[in-house]
Structures are given as C-alpha cells and as structure tokens.
Amino acid sequence: MSTFNDPAAPFIRNILPSYVTPGSWRPWDPTQNCPSGYTCKEMGGQSFGAFSCDELRRIAVEEYGFGDILAGIWCPYSTPAAGFVWNCPAGSYCPNSTTSIECPKGKFCNYKTSSLTLEGGAMPCDRCKAGVQSRTQSREQLITSWVIFSVLCLIVMIRIVRRYFSYNKKKVSRALAIDSIMKAMKGNDELQRVNHKREQEKYSKLRPKLELIAERLRKIRNEDATDSSPPQHDIFYISKSGDILFDANAFFDVIDQNKDGVLSFTELNEVMCLGEERLSAFIANMQARMPLEQRATHLGTVSRETFVRCFLDALADAANLEPTLLEAARLFQEMVAEEAGNTPTSRFSLRTSIKTSMSTPRLSVPYERLHMSPTLTSFLSDMQIYGIVSRFKKKQREEGGKVGEISQEEFVEHYPRFLREVMRPDFTTSLDKPSKSEGLDVAFQHLCLAVKVGKDEVNVLDDVTGRFCSRTMVAVMGGTGSGKSSLLNALCGRAYYGKVSGKVFVNGNEAKIEEQKGVIGFVPQEDIVYPDLTVKENLLYAGRLTLPAGTTREEISELADEVMASLGLSRIANSLVGDARRRGISGGEKKRVNVGIELMKKPKLLFLDEPTSGLDARAAFLVMESLQRLVSSQGMTVVAVIHQPRTDIYDMFDSLMLLGIGGRTVYHGPATKCKYYFENLGYQLKDGESQADWFLDISSGDIEMNIDSTNARKSQVKMRQVENVHLDSDADIEFALTINSYGTKESDIEDREKSLPMITSNQDAVLLKSQMARDELYRQWSVRFETLSQLPMYNPPDAFPLPIMPKQVPGWRQLLIQLRRNSLLSWRNKDARLIDAAILIIAVFLITLLVGHNPDFDRNPTHLFWFTFIASAEEAATMLSVIFQYSMTGIGEIQTYCLMVAIIMTVLIGISATKIIAEKQLQFFRESQSGVSVTAYYLAASITSTVEQGSVAILASVIAYLSMLPGTSILVYIWNFFMISWLSVSWALFLSLIVPQSAVTTVVGAWMALFGLLFCGLLPPGYFNTLYNNNVLAVFAGFVSPVRFFVEGIAVSEAKCLPVQSGFPAGENAFNRTEFERSYPYFQWATYMGHTDLDGAQTFGCNGWYWWVGAAFAVGITIRIAAGMAIHCVGRAKQGKNPFLKEIVADFRGVTGRTRSIFQSFILRGILMFLVLVGFAVLSGWLILRENT
C-alpha cells in the first residue's frame, strides 16, 4: 500500500493541521481493502487516504477537549466499500480501534464498550454468558414475568366468564322458577309430596297436644251423644300408612256447640283449657295471622275460616311458649344443625345430648342464629328474640363467660326463663325505656319556598304555618306537586334549589333546625346506603360516626342490634345490601336500612321522606310501628311524608298536614278530626273508601263538595259533643266548634263560577273545575285559620331550653373509621379492583414487551468523515450528532417507551381513582348533613386511593423492570411509577369534586392524555429546552402534566448509566456537553434533560436520578390541598351547609358579635388553609425551577 502513488497526497499532507501526529495519515488505493485501525474515504473516484482511528480519538481528547468521545470505536480490516468507523459490537469490548475482545461471562457489553469497567460500558450480569449480544432474563425472571401476566389475564377472563354465566344462571333460574310454578299449578306430585312431608313434620311436633285435645273432644262427644247421633270420625288419627291426619273443620263443628259459625271464648276454652290470659293471647295470635279485612269484628271470637287456616300455627306457637328442657335441647340442636348446614336427627333425647356433650367439643351457636331460627321466628318478633339474646349477653358478662356465642348448657338452662320474660306484656328494650327528654317542638310561620323557573319565581310552598309538637307523629300528605318534600327540605335547610322565607321556632326559640343537626335525623326518599356493606355494617359505621364521642364499640353494636330488631332486619343482619350490580336484600328491607341509619344517632326529631314507598303492607306497618314505639318511649318527634297510607298506618299519626297543589295548606290539625273537617265542608266519604285516599282526592280538587250537606253537618255538632264520637277532649271540642262556625255558602260558589274564563274544551273544564275546588279549599282554610291560630296547637310553646348538642367524634377518630370502612369496601369490590389493576399491568407489560425491551443502540458513525473532523473543533462539532447517534437513538426509544407507559397509566389510574368520590357522592352528602367531618372523609378517600393505585403502580413497575432489563436501579422504576400514580390520583380527586359526576370520567381521561402529551418534554410546545428556558411554562407543565417528571426521570436515569463515551454522563475524559450545547442548538433536544441539575444528571452512575422527587411530591400535596378546599366549597347546600358567601357573612357577624369563638371561625380556617395552599404552591414552583449547576 505504501507504494501507491496518490497524486493528491502532497496536497493533503500540506493541509493537515499541525496537531496531527505524523504518520497518522496514509495514502490509500480505493481498489484495495482499508487497513485495520484506519478509516478510509474517497469521493468521485478521488481518494482522501486512510486516517488512524486512534489518532481521531486522541485529537478529540487532547486537541479539542471534547473528552474521550471516540472510546469504544472499532476500525477493522474491511473491504473498500466498508472502510468506516464502527462502534464496538454488542457482546465485545474494544480497548483500541484494532482489537475486539469477547465480553466474559458475568458481564454484558453493549455497543461501544471500551473496557470491562462500569464507566467503560461493561455492566454486571450474573445471568449473561460470554459474548451475549443482548441482556436476557434469567429463568426465574422469565417465569415470574409470564406467571404474573398469565395470572392477571386469567383473572380477567374468569371474571368475565363468571359474570356471563351468572347472568345466564339468573335467566335459567327464572325459567326454572316459572317452570316449577307451572308444574305446581298442574298438580306436580313431587311438590305435593314435599308439602305433605312438611305438614307431617309439623303434626309430629304437635302430636302430644293434639292427642290431649282429641281426648277432651271424645269426652265432649260422649256427653253430647244421643242414640240418633250419626257416627263421627276422630279429628286426629293415624292412617294405615302412618300419616298423621287432622280435620280442622270437624274440630270446629264439635266445639261450636250453638252452631252459629263462630267460636266464642267459652267454647274454645272448654277444649284448650289455657286460662283466660293465655287463651286471649291464643285467639289474638290466630286473628293476627289473617288479613286485616278478614279479621273478626268482635274480640274474643273466632270465625270458621280463621280457625281452619290458623289453628295449627297458633297451637305450634302456644306449644313453644312453655318449652321443657327436652324441647329446649331439641331446639338448640336444630340451630346447631342449621349453622352447620345439616339436617337434625329426628330422634333426640336429653340424656343422649348430655352424654354426647361430655365426650365431644362444646357445642355453641352465634347470637345471629337465634334470629334465623325458623322455630323462633314463627312465634317471636325480632324484638323479642333480641330480648332473649340481650339477656344471654348480660348473663355471660356477669359470669365472665364467652360473649358472642351461646353454649348448649346455657341455652337449655336459661332459655325457658328468658322466653317467659320477653313474652310478658311489660317487656321492654333499651329503646323502649321511658325518656325524660322533652324532645323537639317545631313551629313555623308563613313559611315560603320560591324556586326560579326561567325568569320567574314560583312558590313551591306558599305561606304555610303549623306546628309539630314534641312526642307526636305527624303525617305530611298531599298530591303530586303539593310541596310535601319541599316542606321538609325548607325546614331542614336542604332546599338549596330555592329561597326560603318565614320564621321557624325550635322549642319556642326562634332558630334554625339545621343548627340542631346533632339531634335531628333525615331519612331521604332515595335509599342512600352503602351497597357493598352488610345491613349491620351500615348501621355500625353510621353509629361510630354520629353517636356522641365516648360511646363504646359494645354500646354501638348493641344499639345496632336493637335498631335491626325494631325494624325487622335481624334475620338479614349479615346480608349485603346490594345494588343493581350485586344482588342483595329486597327493596323494602333496603328502605328499613335507610331508616335505621338515622335511628343510630338517637335523634329527637326525625324527618322521613316517604318511608313506606316501595314497601309491602306488612313492611310498611312494621316500620311505622317501630317509629310509633320510639315516639311514645323516647319522646321523639316524627314527621313523615306519607303517600296513600293504609288505615292502620294512618291511625298511628297524631297530627296531619294536608297540602294542596302549589304548596298551600288544605288542613292542619289532629289526624282523627280531618274527616270531620271535610264532612263539615260538604264532602262525603263513600262506603269502603280509604279516608287517606279521600283526603288526597279532595286536596287535588278531584271531588266536589256538597253544599246541601254543609248545613246538615252544622246541626249535628252539639249531638256529637254529647255522644263523644269524634271529640275526645275539651281541646277537640274547641277545635270542632271553631271549624263548624264557618260554612261554604252557595252564593260564594256561584260568584266564583261567574268569574271563570270561557271554557274551550272538556279538558279545560275539568282543569278549571279542579282549580276552583282547590281555591275554595285554600279560602276555607284561611278563613278558619284566623280563629284556629289562637289555639295552642298552632302557636309556638313558651320557650324552653334547646337540647344539648352531643360531643362529636374527634376528627382523627373519624379518619380511622373512614379508613377502615374504605378498606372493607375495597375488599368487597376486589373483583373490580383486580380487573382495573390487571388491565393496567397487562398494558404496561405489553408495551414493555413490544416497545421497551432492549432499546436499540445499534447505530454506527459510518458517515464520520475524518477530513472534516480533524479540520477544527468547530467542524468536528458538526460530527457530534453522527458520533452520538447510537446513544441518542437508544435514549429516544426509552423516552418513547416512557411516554406510552405514562399516558396509559395516567388515564387508567385517573379514571379508577375518581370512583372513590364520584360513586359515593350521595353517601357523602348524607353523612355531611348528619355532621360527619368532611375533612376526615376526604383524607380517608385520598389515603385509600393513594394506597390502592400506588400499590398497582409499584407492581407494574416491577413487571416493567423485569421485562425491560434496564441498566439503572429498580428503585428508579418503583419511584417514578409511584410518582405518576401520586400525581394522577391528586388530579383525579380534584376533578371528581369540581366536575359533574356524569362527565368526570371523560374529563379526567381527556385531562391526563392532553396535558400528558403536550408537556411531556418530547412534543411541541413542551420540548425540554422550551420548558427549561421558560419559567412560567415550566411551572405550569409541572402542575398539570403528571407525565412531565416521569419521562425525564427514567430517561435521565438510563442515560446516566451509559458509558462515558456515549455523550450523556460526565467523567474522566467524558464529553463536556455543557461547553458545546449552547453553540450547537441541534444537540439540545436530547441533552437538555436534567438541565437544572446538570451535576446530578451528568454524574455517571446506575443508582438513578431523583431530582424531581421533592417537586412531584409538593405538586401532589398542593393539588390535594386544593381538592380539600374544593370539597368544602362545592355542593355546600347538598352537604346541609349555607352557601359559601352566606357562611362567611354569618361567621363574620358571629365573631364580631362574640357569639362564636375566633378559633372556630370559618373565615380563619379558610384563611389558614389558603395560606397553606399558597405556601405549597410556592414551594412546588421553587422546587421545579431550582438549579444545581
């Protein structure tokens, strides 16, 4: 090659810079191979010769001060067409340009590795064999990654399949149910056999008593028999097949001695021999089992139909009232078998039971089993069973026994005595104990509620005056649009949708009812409960949050048991409430849970908005009966909006407020006098019609008054006073005389008819006629109320002390309770949580597998023209993009991977995090109205969501790390993944509070994706160099984009771990990019990462870069403080609080008037929170902009 005569050789030697070492350049024949250790170049057939690669490396270090940027290059002996500069191939290291050595076992040498040191590019890799060209997972890592991925996919598939088959199972169950009903209607033999078996089991238990009754009947027959009497078969006998037969009709015929078709008390007692008290209870039991309309009109008598249908059931109850030790032991064994899911043995003796208990473990049943026992529930109410359970609890505590379960010995010994106690007429529970409290007396005058409809104001309530006396039950009735619910909302301060005016008096003191929040309960019309909690858990958590501070867990649990017993919920205490997604209790039971939540705070005044809607007759009666018991025993005032109540429910109310359309009063007074009032106006109640329905028809204007009957009613008043049919006291007589002193004159009706406009259709005629009837009702009441308003029942009482507000549970305690409940709710929703987590982790795994696994650093500086490079430092700098192309490409792929992972994570985590607040808004508003700490609720939601989403993010980071095999530490991935979940949850909480629930998912998803892309540092307008040169944009991006810190954090951590010749990390002889990036802007887009912390970002190391830790945490705290302030400001009316500005004015007046302590000032707390918010915002901005150069 030295003999090659290159005509350009003298020219090239003359123009070589003086700092080029002699002999570094050689002439080169383009037709020959390029020698090893040299880079060759020719253009247009003109040879530029061969230049030493080692000399290029020396010039960059010693002459230009670039650092050892060409370390790890390789210039092998090559063909003329390939005389380029190469990066040392993966799997080898190149100490000089002519040598390529295989990377030893236990090391991984990426492209351009110059030595076996970490700075030279050789990374420890225990699982790597000699010469491996890519980092590979160990068998354990590979198995772990795929196992986790497979398990998550399997979970999702199982949940989907289970949901699908569950749906089909429901359809099949319905079809089977319909089929079984059809078979039953056709006389299915199997069903008949089952019913026959059950009937025989019932007879077998009653056999001793039936035999005794049959013996008495034989004696009666023998005494009454005559020679002409036809032969009669026994009413109770055993057939040849062994079946026990009972003929109730024959039994009735025998004891009905006077043959009048009705059994008298004497006739029945001749056979039963129960005594007067027990026989009365026996007859009442039979009557109670019949529908209300079919019960006997005369007490102490039993019709044939009642006797035939109910005698055996009543006899079974009577048989259970005085159990023997053997029967008590048998009952216990039944409950043990039910608890274990087995069928009890048919033959049992007390001796066997005692002998068995001596040799086997001690048998016991939980308290809940008593409420679920078919035997006990057949003749005892829930309150009576609760009374038995409470007596067992008390006995166990006195004796130091185990509370929570009842042993066989305890049950057999004490059950008969406890049963007798709860069956006594004077049986009471703690809820039934007389209260010395005066309760709450509420009076209101000229109450109005105006609502804006377009530009006009419409009165929903119009000049309503009345009084709800303490220790009474008040019914609020009216047709649709009469303002029943609005009346309750206006009184309670919940009418956020309008303007309330008028005066309200509490215990004779002009005040606001909402200020007595601690002793007032409000049961909304909607069943606002936690569907993922059981019935008892809903009550327990309500009690823990609303009962006075210091109430023990045992007291709360006992109160919950008692409330459930009073509402007939004990049997389903451990059943999930459920909702549309998950099957739970029935609608009627859910309504009672809704009532029970308010009873847990032991209110003195209870408002209920249509508590019987959706309930069957028995459930509605049970609810109202329990409320009536609380009124009489606790002195509670109950005000219920009621819709079409049955007669037995209506009779429970002491007072009635009847409203007409437009919110005007039609009647307000004693419930028993309303019928008399309307009859006095000329209305006639038809036979068989419900008076409650009659009242509603009258108030709606659907019934015309009969003027002729009005005068007839006037003449009957004094006669009714004497007969005392309607008037039970002097106050009632005064009320009746007052309403009777006025009448409807026919001339008044004629005058009103003349003033009506022209009627154009039949429909208009009906509407106008109804309107005229209502106007007349309003006029009649206004006229009468001028006199009635003088009565005490319509005026506030003399002022007496307001109730003392109970001390609230401390905020820190409420926070712990809320956290415990949130944890339980999360566990109950683990299926949904697992699916959300699985989707996120699967997405991260697939992105890592397809995009982020082993970033491509295979880019050689093949176009490095040595002639340009040695010309000058300025010319050489134009080659930097070629030299560092391999590292910039690899880091660019890492940045792209980070961006894809970040976007999918922010969107999925953000949407998932909104559920904890968005899906529980109604429950939050209800608890806030009850006085529960809003701050504690928000902090619990924030902590719970952070833990949930942070755990998923950390798990995803581990999966990504194991799949990607990065050079940096696993802590980098754990921290950055957690950081993005921290910021995403922060924004999700804030947006879920200020955005309507229906749009929150869309807004959160759009927010995360939009701002994540705009300010990620990789796309306009938020390039890294732009963000670092614009402080305002940098701070804005740091706040609104959770992706901002994630992409840079992982990319810089990966770049720091590259060898020093890659152009990113700093080190001995490393590239000094600080000096050149200002002069060569084309290089800034990649090197501007970590610009405010160049010392940290450029320092070589694989432990990661954590410059944004403080900034990300401070930004998240700032956003969460803003969300905490938002939850206090948004929806205040729904929280039962004054509007924001109104609260500030009231607070200012309270502080200046010294009626409120400055330390309890709403303004002071708001100012402090605002200062804290500003402080963290300033801290966040400083942490984002601070520099460490």
Image: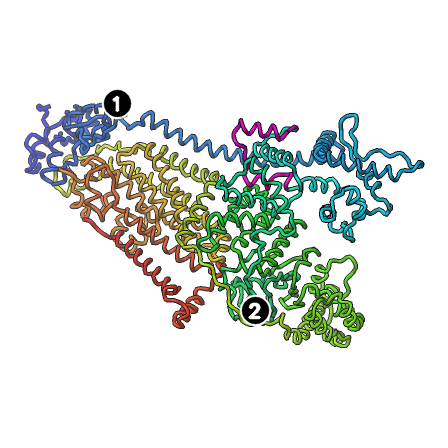
Where 308 falls versus 681 (above or below)? above
Percent of width and height locating residue 928: 47, 56
- Name the one closer to the observer, 833 or 977: 833
Question: Which residue sits at x=86%, y=34%?
Answer: 232
The residue to which callout 1 is attached is 129
The residue to which callout 2 is attached is 457
Q: Is residue 105 left or right of residue 448?
A: left
What is the basis of the colouring in this image? rainbow
Q: Residues within 10 Å of mark 1 (few under 14, many from 20)?
A: some
Magenta residues, as a range? Answer: 347-376
Q: Is residue 423 left or right of residue 1032?
A: right
Q: Is residue 844 visible?
A: yes
Q: Is residue 907 left or right of residue 872?
A: right
Task: Identify which amino acid the numbered label 2 is placed on.
Answer: Glu
Counting labels gives 2
Tell me the SS state at disc 1.
loop
Question: Which residue sits at x=60%, y=52%?
Answer: 428
Task: Identify which amino acid the numbered label 1 is placed on.
Answer: Lys
Where 596 falls versus 752 (above or below)? above
Identify the main secondary structure in magenta. Answer: helix
Dividing the picture into quadrants, the one containing residue 970 is top left
